[in-house]
Image (tube, rainbow, N blue to C red):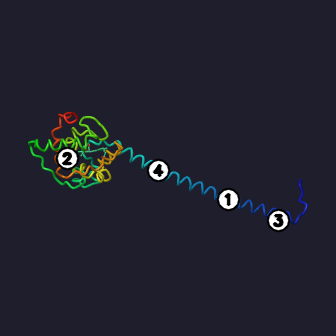
Amino acid sequence: MLRPLLPESSAYVSEVSDLQGQSGYLRASLNFAILVTRKAVCSCALVILLAGWGACADSSNRSSGDAVSAETAAELALEEAEGGIGPVDSVELDATIDTALVAQGEAIFSMKCGACHKMTERYVGPPLGDVLERRTPEFIMNMMLNPDEMAKKHPEAKALLAEYLTQMPNQNLSQEDARAVLEFLRTSQGDADKATQ
Ligand code: HEC
């Protein structure tokens, strides 16, 4: 057995080692507490991450052409959900197509839209040949006149942005120009590739 050389100091040593033992215990429990906190933080982060991922997956899964969903209607007033966000509240479509307006719209379309939109194929933006089957006339005009706000606030336009990864730029159309383009888009229904030739 090892005998301490100085008995008085041995008491001191044992006291110190007692203290060390205590602080070791304290340190251990502190470490444990930190570990637990870290774990809690980590799992919180994980939950947030998963929730975020879930939301993303949800929005990219949402088909852009679907009728306005209940979720969409809950986020916006129904008229905004269907009519889009922008200066156009309501559009009257005549039963007959105004050919002079169509010609005007076609010229504007080839100048300001054709670089990104085709009628039957996906291009920089979605095909527009059947857009009137998917959207209301108001939605289409508001998309032409107010694309930035639409892409920021409207769930369907947001979903399009997520899908096409390009923000449609504002083409600075007047309301009359947009109305003419809309008339042209009416003629392309079912006769879609006429516009791209
Ligand atoms: C620089 C490319 C670009 C130009 C130019 C452009 N668009 Fe777009 N457009 C897009 C993209 C990309 C989207 C989808 C993403 C978004 O909403 O920003 C889109 C979306 C749209 C939509 C919504 C389609 C849907 O399925 O709901 C309409 C309508 C539309 N554009 C019409 C037009 C018209 C009309 C013009 C011309 C006045 C035009 N765009 C000019 C790129 C463009």
CB-based contact (under 8 Å), mark 4 and mark 1? no
Badge 1 element: helix
Q: As displayed, is residue 167 above or below residue 25?
A: above
- Earlier-in-chain disc, 2 versus 4: 4
Q: Mark 3 points at which residue?
A: 12
Q: In this view, does 2 lie to the left or right of 31?
A: right
- Earlier-in-chain disc, 2 versus 3: 3
- Foreground pick, 56 / 19: 56
CB-based contact (under 8 Å), mark 2 and mark 3? no
Badge 4 element: helix
Residue neighbourhood size for the residue with mark 1, other residues' Cα within 10 Å, grouped as few (<14), some (14–19), many (≥20): few
Q: Disc 2 and disc 1: Cα gap in Å? A: 67 Å
Q: Name the residue under label 1.
A: 27
Q: Which of marks 2 and 1 is in front?
A: 2
- Earlier-in-chain disc, 1 versus 3: 3
Q: Mark 4 points at which residue?
A: 47
Q: Which amino acid does label 1 sit on?
A: Arg
Q: Which of marks 4 and 3 is in front?
A: 4
Residue neighbourhood size for the residue with mark 4, other residues' Cα within 10 Å, grouped as few (<14), some (14–19), many (≥20): few
Q: What residue type is labelled 4?
A: Val
Q: Name the residue under label 2.
A: 136
CB-based contact (under 8 Å), mark 1 and mark 3? no
Badge 2 element: loop
